[in-house]
Image (cartoon, rainbow, N blue to C red):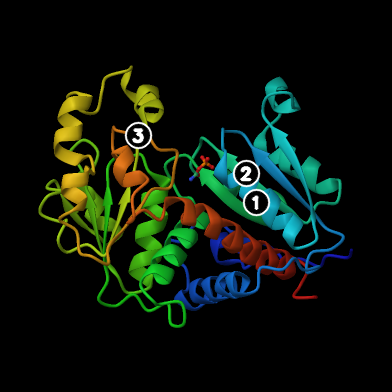
Amino acid sequence: MTATAPTPTPDIAAEPRALLELAGIDPARLRALLADAASVLRDPAPTDALAGRTVANLFFEDSTRTRLSFTLAARAEGAEAIDLTSAGSSVSKGESVADTARTVEAMGVAALVVRHRSAGAAHVVARAVRCAVLNAGDGRHEHPTQGLLDALTIAEAHGRLDSFDFSGLRIAIVGDIASSRVARSDVAALRALGASVVCVGPPALAPDELACLGCEVSQDLDAQLADADAIQMLRIQFERHDAGSGGASPVGSIHEYREGYALSPERAARMKPSAIVMHPGPINRDVELSAAVADGPRSRILRQVTLGVAVRRAVLRASVHAAEGGAR
Ligand code: CP
């Protein structure tokens, strides 16, 4: 496989071989990726679009959904998928992320899928290599394929798969927004598609400064229930707070948090009949989301997981072909 990748540009996030973030993405590129994912939904049969290629998952942080989803997506497009995790690799001996990425690329892989606890890690990898690079979640920064699959889930539920025009839709994202790379990718994607977005949580988790992302900010979940067409619930990421606060809780108590911000059956009953409930996972059942709502008729949580494979098939195809100079 000969790859004549373009020289990296200063705006590496705009290179079509890399999907690093959705903030600032060209809406035409966003819609093209979503339209391709929708075409996979209509015809999910395996293809040989990436036959002969290898996709490497470089996961330096835990994952269930994203890693398996990229693996299944690569295989569905005819590629082989291999895994590297920090435990058991030379990362544990002090090798840098960039050197690890160059090393794996030198073995002939077509795409690197990168998850890391540090914001910007996928950018570092993209600058170090010439193959396709997909950000599978970097710290609190972004999780772009999650943002795409969330947009696809909303488009499917609200009949927007043909246009991906979200005008008139209002989406609430509830919970630990401050720690959430998913929220950042969701706000970017949903705003670019024309939705209005409100981020909801207590001040420590949803500070007013989040308005700079282009969303509204509210501390009153009950005031948002009747207007939302979709509610994306987020877990409290205690592990990220522990890293920065010496273990101090960002919320008074779980009981108080539930009282103010958990989506209970009583709250779900006040939503529009057509409104859906989403969660990127992993769920802390009966903390941010009651089990009855997670498993109830409004829930699209497992559908999000299913659509994630279609999104990652589309993203892998586009980025690998771009890295190869558009050759098919
Ligand atoms: N939504 C998500 O990123 O889940 P995983 O951490 O299981 O990949």
Proximity of marks 1 and 2: CB atoms separated by less than 8 Å: yes
Drawn side of residue 217 relative to residue 295, left or right: left
Pick the front one: 41 or 242? 41
Q: Residue at x 60, y 57 (%)?
A: 309
What residue sits right under mark 3 in the picture?
Answer: 285
Disc 1 marks a residue whose amino acid type is: Phe
Drawn side of residue 216 relative to residue 68, left or right: left
Disc 1 residue lies near ligand 1 with CB under 8 A: no
Is residue 202 visible in the rendered image? The answer is no
Label 3: state its secondary structure: loop
Label 1: state its secondary structure: helix
Proximity of marks 3 and 1: CB atoms separated by less than 8 Å: no
Is residue 204 visible in the rendered image? The answer is yes
What residue sits right under mark 1 in the picture?
Answer: 70
Which of disc 2 and disc 3 is earlier in sequence?
2
Which mark, residue 67?
2
Q: Is residue 94 above or below residue 216?
A: above
Proximity of marks 3 and 2: CB atoms separated by less than 8 Å: no
Disc 3 residue lies near ligand 1 with CB under 8 A: no
